[in-house]
Every structure is written in C-alpha cells, then in structure tokens.
Image (tube, rainbow, N blue to C red):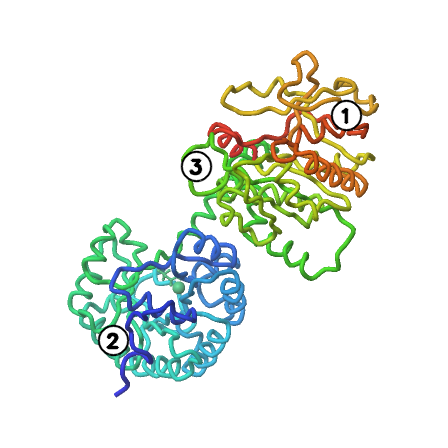
Amino acid sequence: MVTAGSAPLSAPSAEPATKAARLRALLASPKLEFLMEAHNGLSAKIVEESGFEGIWASGLSISAALGVRDNNEASWTQVLEVLEFMADATTVPILVDGDTGWGNFNNMRRAVRKLCQRGIGGICIEDKLFPKTNSFIGDGQPLADIDEFCGKIKAGKDSQADDDFVVIARVEALISGWGLDEALRRADAYHAAGADGILIHSKQKAADEILAFVAEWGRRSPVVIVPTTYFETPTDAFREAGISLAIWANHNLRAAITAMRDVCRQVYREESLLGVEDGIVGVRDVFDLTGNEELADAERRYLPARDEARAVVVAATRGDQLGALTEDRPKCMIDIRGQPLLRRLVATLRESGVRDVTVVRGYKKDMINLPSIRTADNDLYAATGEAASLACAKDHIRDACVIAYGDILFRRFILDELIAADDDIVLAVDAHWQERPFDPEGGYRDFAACSRPFTRDLLDDEPAFLARLGDDVPKNQVNGEWIGLARLSARGSETVRSELEAMLADGSLARASLPQLFTRLVERGHTVRAVYVTGQWLDVDVAADLVKADKFL
Ligand code: SPV
Ligand code: MG
C-alpha cells in the first residue's frame, strides 16, 4: 500500500526552505491556517502584503481574469504562465487549483513537474471529468472513476521534484449529491493513493455536511475547506472541528469587479476623473507594489555612472515633538501611508534624476536602513546641529548636489526648478509662508529675507537672492520660508565644503544650523539664489503634520 504523503507532515523546527515546504508546514500546523485567493501577480502581492502565509491560485478567478469561463477554456500552459508571474511576485507558497489535473494521469505528471520547476507549493485536483465545470453550476455533475483518480494522484506524487510538494485531493461527492458515505469512501481511497490532504467541498449555505465529514474523518489526514457558500459559519467552528486549512476562494476577484465597475461607471457618467481620484490608490502605490525602488537601486549598481546630481539628506535628529512616535525611530522613518517618510523623499529625489543619496544618521541610526541609500553618521547628533551633520557627509558634497532636510515632502517640480536654475547655490523659498498656520509648537521656522519679494507676475523672471535666513529675521523683512531644500552646482559644492571646514576651524560648526551656514555664505559675498515656490511642500514636526502628509500624497 502507498502511504499518505511523501514527506512526514510534521511542523519543521527551522524556517522551511522551499515554498513547498512552507505549504506543507501550513497543512501540518495544528492551528487552522488560511489561504487567500489571487489570480495574477498583482493580487498575489496584495495577498502576501496583507499577511496571508499562502495563496490559493483559483481556477475560477484566473479564468475570469483572463476573460474566459471556468471550463478549462484557458489551456493549462496559459494558467502556468499566470502562476509563474504570481510565484515570481511573492515569497509565500501557492496552492494551485489544478481542476481535474488538466487531463489524465500523464497530463498530471507533466503539470506537476512544471509546477515544481516554477516554485509552486502544491496542486489540488478534483474528482470530476475533463473539461471541468465550476462546482457551483448545475447539480449532479459526473464524478471521476475512483481508481482512475487514484492513479492520477500517484502519478502526481511520483513526478514531484520537490519532496515537500503537496498534492491535495478534492472530493466532490457531497456537491454532486452522493452523500457522506461516498465522500468518505473516496477520501479514504485518495488518502491511500498518497494525497497529502483532502479538500472536502460543499455548496450548502450551512456547514453541516462539512462538519459531519470532518467528525467521521477524524485526523486521518489534513482537511481543507472552501467556505464560499457557508460563509456565515463562524470561523471558530472550523477551528474547533480541527480543520487544517480554510481557503477564501474568490474574494479578491469579486472585490476587483466591484471596484472596477464602480470607478468605470462613475468616470463614464461624470466624464471626469475628479470624483474618483480620492478613492483610488495613487500611481506611486503602483510603483511601490511593483518594486520600482529595487530597480532604481539596481540601476545605481549596474548602469555606468552618469553625470547626475547627488543628494545629502540631513536626518540625524529624533523629532522630539512627535513624542512616542519617535521613541523607536527617527522622525524621517515615521510611517506615512505605509512607507517611511524618508523613502518617499528619496523616491521624489530619484524622480528628478538624483540617484546617489547619502543620508546623515544620528538618533536610532540603525533604523535608517533603506536599500537604496548611502549613509554617513553623526554620532554626536545630540550635542551638535545641522551644519555638523552636513559636514559628516562632506565627501559626498561634490559635483551637482542637492541638500535636503530628512523630514520634508515636496512636489517634484520644485526640485526640477532648482536644478534648472543657473546659479551655484539655490534655495527653494516658499512665498506663501504666511498661509502655513503658525504653530508655536511647530518648531523652528527658516524665514528668508531676499533681495526682492515674490510677485505674481508670470512674466517677471528677475531672480531673487538670499539676504539672510533664520528664525530671527524681523517679520517685516520676511519674504518667504526656506523649505529645507537646496541645490549646489559643482562650484557651489566646493564653496559649501570649504565653508564647513572654515566653521570647523573657527569653532562655530558644532552648533550651527543650515540657515546659519547659508547666511554666513551670503555675508562672505557668495551669491545664494532664492527660487520662489508657492506651497506644495510640507515638513513633519508635530503629529498634526502627519495628517497633512497623508493628504499630501
Ligand atoms: C476555484 O476557486 O476555482 C475553486 C473553488 O475551485 S470553487 O469555485 O468553489 O469550485
Ligand atoms: Mg476551481
């Protein structure tokens, strides 16, 4: 007799190596575990991102997403192609809905070999006839001959390249109206043929027949269920019954249909995007989901270095005013809609072609660990100011170089304007500084006095130059607020570097702020250009700023 399963169904002690081993561990786990449906690379990523430890590659959903019926209209190699995208996009295991094994025992052998090659954790096959029909359509669908189906299970188990690959046998006897005894007879045969688990399916609104099956089956092998129709049954009932795996089988597909219909109908009706924009993710989320940051990082490693701007981001401080939020991380690593603030800042820099980003760390420096940045450390951050932090990265202040505070977000066009300005040292100054509510808790504000005020005249392109920058500029002289962003040409970088050295020599470096550095440059006769902007940026000082940052994205 063939014993059930090709590897023992015990939970391994260390993190299992392959996806198949991880799926096997889920099946063997003494707890009720869950698989969530996905039907393409993107939905698979979202399933993993949500915390699920495994994915159900639903035949119904994959077919529907391809625009065809769940009747084997998509060929098995077309399904395989979708599975490959799903597996590549995720690290959690996938259990594939293999319908009837896409043919006879021979098709099953080939399918299992291919699934193993593509890093799929397991396959579930159902005891119906090829071409299949979805189980929820019609009544009394014919079932496969038991011996023929057992041969298919054996063929699959004999073909797996990974010992941990899982073959689940799905029993359709209850759905086809053959009753509990036939379901148990079939489950027994499939178990003996080597199936690693039994999926007992039902289309009733209540879970009675499922629970009756499990009560009789005991723990002969792990049991898998698909509570699509009996969704009102509390999940604890499955847990108490000792069920191994529950599959939420088609809910991402159905959610996507609802969301796509809503947005299509609204845009069609309103002939505008205005009404839908707030209710859908931004394109930035799409870039994040598909891993654009990794590509940018790889470009830095593999593409020849181009003559592009670099950036130094000063992010050494804690951000005390944010209280508990910065207990375990510096404020630049605070979460803004699912991503650290710094990651969003770095993404904006990259969009403007700035790929070489050095971040000066201080407080909780190990938390600043994005893959796409270089780091420099100011270990004396508690006793020193921003200029000292900047000096910690002075080797990176060369060529064209952007200097930014680590707690700001700004629209990309602001940086593009700084890059386009034809001066050696250029600062972005917000002419609408008075519209930013004055918050006495909001900390230091970098007020700028300039050679001329901002005018709304679009034809007025006479440049403005910085006269003085700091918290202490008399209010009647303030023309704007520095947003914490500056751009240096190669010559400007040299100027800043040598000024930092001069400050170190005369003892003023340790305590100086960046506004004091720029004011000092002006006092020494260097030209510092002020490019006026009107809002479209923010900094994060207090908790209320986080709400604004959420909206800003
Ligand atoms: C699927 O998700 O394709 C399934 C589950 O096989 S069911 O639709 O319930 O048959
Ligand atoms: Mg199916």
Q: Residue at x 20, y 67 (%)?
A: 179
Q: In this view, does 114 lie to the left or right of 308?
A: left
**Quadrant position of residue 245:** bottom left
Residue 42 drawn at (x, y percent): 52, 55
Q: Earlier in the sequence, mark 2 or mark 3?
A: 2
Residue 469 drawn at (x, y percent): 69, 24
Q: Is residue 320 left or right of residue 522?
A: left
Taking the view exactly as shown, the residue that stands out farthest to the bottom is: 1
* Relative vertical location of residue 250 with respect to residue 95 in this rendering, above or below: above
Distance, label 1 to label 2, CA atoms, is 89 Å
Q: Is mark 1 on a helix, strand or loop?
A: helix
Q: Name the residue under label 1.
A: 523
* Relative vertical location of residue 373 with respect to residue 280 in this rendering, above or below: below
Mark in the foreground, 1 or 2: 1
Depth order, front residue of 448/422: 448
Q: Is residue 238 left or right of residue 417?
A: left
Q: What residue type is labelled 3?
A: Leu
Disc 3 residue lies near ligand 1 with CB under 8 A: no
Report if residue 265 is visible in the image. no
Residue 229 drawn at (x, y percent): 30, 54
Q: Which amino acid does label 2 sit on?
A: Arg
Q: Name the residue under label 2.
A: 186
How crowded is the residue under tag 3: few (<14 C-alpha within 10 Å), some, or many (20+)? some
Q: Residue at x 33, y 76 (%)?
A: 144
Which quadrant does the N terminus fall into? Answer: bottom left
Q: Which residue is drawn at 62% across and 45% down?
A: 347
Q: What residue type is labelled 1?
A: Glu
Q: Name the residue under label 3.
A: 325
